[in-house]
């Protein structure tokens, strides 16, 4: 069967193989032919965009060893409390879990957590790496940038949206609508991008589960309703839903139970880019990667997919699409 080919988004780079958001993971994603490579962005105290998934440095760097005593009262080391020159002294490693006191691997089968071979890149450095590879490999891999915790930044007098747009402007990407997506779990940055900044870059509203306590006042259950999706379509070009809000498990006959979210969102004119495909963490009732990809891509017709293992998705698409 030959169907439309969705875009492959390397989630935090080829993070199934190398520590998330390191330049090494991004280079590997590029070599694996990901269409887009993801950047999660937070700001340093001096308002420089860096590529980091958490608003804190605890799980993926040696901050507790390098800067003991710099945690807030809640015990966490916030990236926004550190100057860029301090962040650049840190070593990044494979993600560890808070529950283990930052000792055990979040994904035990992945890169060793003890190896601190990498740094925390700035957004500008990462753009230079990917554009450099685009030149040397004659490719056009794009950027898929998430604004992390925008409200928490504003409380600390930091504007993550404006800071990212400044870097994109500097790098000649601010008008390149086919090369850059912007994403957020909150709606306000996306609405600002449309009206205040009049950015032409496509905007993706990420949809969390209400139980996760995202930095947003949005009710994600309402957002997934048809009226909610129609509202999202007034300020965004697409949604990034959780796979488990689409594939709900198995029924008594062992058939997949599916929500019609993908079809409803597309009927509202929205792209659908679900997260996160992981070879080593398949949802319940899925026994092979191909089963899950078959459902999402061929049965439901998603427009893109966030993947820790971009090579698995690219190979599946090469086998099964035009
Ligand atoms: Ca992200």
Image (cartoon, rainbow, N blue to C red):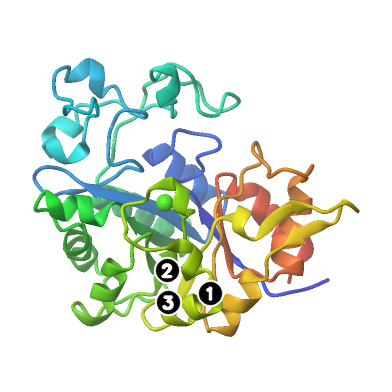
Instruction: From this view, report whether residue 4 is shown above or below residue 35.
Output: below
Q: Is mark 1 within 8 Å of ligand 1?
A: no
Q: Is residue 120 visible?
A: yes
Specify few, some or many for label 2: CA neighbours under 10 Å numbering under 14, 14-19, or 20 or more: many
Q: Secondary structure at mark 1?
A: strand
Residue carrying label 1? 271
Q: Quadrant of residue 68?
A: top left
Name the residue at 14% across, 30% down: 86
Name the residue at 39% across, 84% down: 234
Q: Earlier in the sequence, mark 3 or mark 2?
A: 2
Q: In whole angstroms, how far apart are the C-alphas of marks 1 and 3?
A: 11 Å
Q: Earlier in the sequence, mark 2 or mark 1?
A: 2
Name the residue at 32% across, 58% down: 216
Q: Which mark is residue 110?
A: none
Q: Position of residue 288 (x, y in %)?
A: 78, 44
Instruction: From this view, report whether residue 270 is shown above or below residue 37.
Output: below
Locate residue 99 relative to residue 83 in the image: left or right: right
Residue carrying label 2? 204
Q: Are dots 2 and 1 in contact, CB under 8 Å?
A: yes
Q: Are dots 1 and 3 in contact, CB under 8 Å?
A: no
Specify few, some or many for label 1: CA neighbours under 10 Å numbering under 14, 14-19, or 20 or more: many
Q: Earlier in the sequence, mark 1 or mark 3?
A: 3
Q: Secondary structure at mark 2?
A: strand
Q: In whole angstroms, how far apart are the C-alphas of marks 3 and 2?
A: 9 Å
Quadrant in the picture for the C terminus: bottom right
Q: Position of residue 281 (x, y in %)?
A: 64, 38
Q: Is residue 114 visible?
A: no
Disc 1 or disc 3, which is closer to the eye? 3
| Residue in front for this viewpoint, 137 or 148 | 148
Residue carrying label 3? 232
């Amino acid at each position: 069967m030959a169907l439309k080919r969705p875009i492959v988004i390397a989630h935090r780079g080829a993070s199934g193989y190398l520590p998330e958001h390191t330049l090494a993971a991004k280079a590997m994603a590029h070599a694996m032919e990901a269409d887009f490579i993801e950047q999660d962005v937070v700001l340093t105290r001096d308002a420089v965009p860096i590529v980091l998934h958490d608003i804190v440095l605890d799980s993926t760097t040696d901050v507790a060893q390098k800067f003991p005593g710099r945690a807030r009262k809640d015990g966490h080391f916030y990236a926004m409390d550190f100057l860029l020159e301090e962040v650049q002294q840190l070593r990044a490693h494979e993600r560890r879990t808070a529950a283990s006191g930052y000792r055990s691997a979040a994904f035990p089968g992945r890169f060793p957590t003890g190896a601190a071979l990498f740094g925390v890149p700035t957004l500008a450095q990462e753009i230079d790496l990917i554009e450099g590879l685009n030149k040397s490999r004659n490719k056009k891999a794009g950027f898929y940038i998430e604004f992390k915790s925008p409200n928490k930044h504003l409380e600390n007098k930091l504007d993550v949206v404006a800071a990212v747009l400044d870097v994109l402007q500097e790098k000649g990407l601010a008008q390149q609508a086919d090369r850059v997506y912007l994403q957020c779990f909150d709606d306000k940055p996306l609405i600002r991008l449309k009206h205040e900044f009049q950015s032409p870059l496509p905007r993706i509203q990420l949809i969390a589960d209400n139980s996760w306590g995202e930095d947003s006042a949005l009710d994600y259950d309402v957002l997934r309703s048809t009226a909610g999706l129609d509202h999202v379509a007034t300020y965004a070009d697409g949604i990034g839903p959780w796979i488990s809000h689409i594939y709900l498990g198995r029924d008594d006959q062992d058939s997949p139970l599916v929500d019609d979210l993908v079809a409803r969102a597309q009927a509202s004119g929205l792209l659908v880019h679900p997260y996160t495909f992981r070879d080593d963490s398949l949802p319940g009732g899925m026994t092979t990667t191909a089963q899950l990809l078959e459902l999402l891509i061929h049965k439901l017709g998603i427009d893109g997919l966030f993947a820790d293992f971009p090579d698995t998705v690219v190979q599946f698409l090469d086998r099964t699409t035009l």
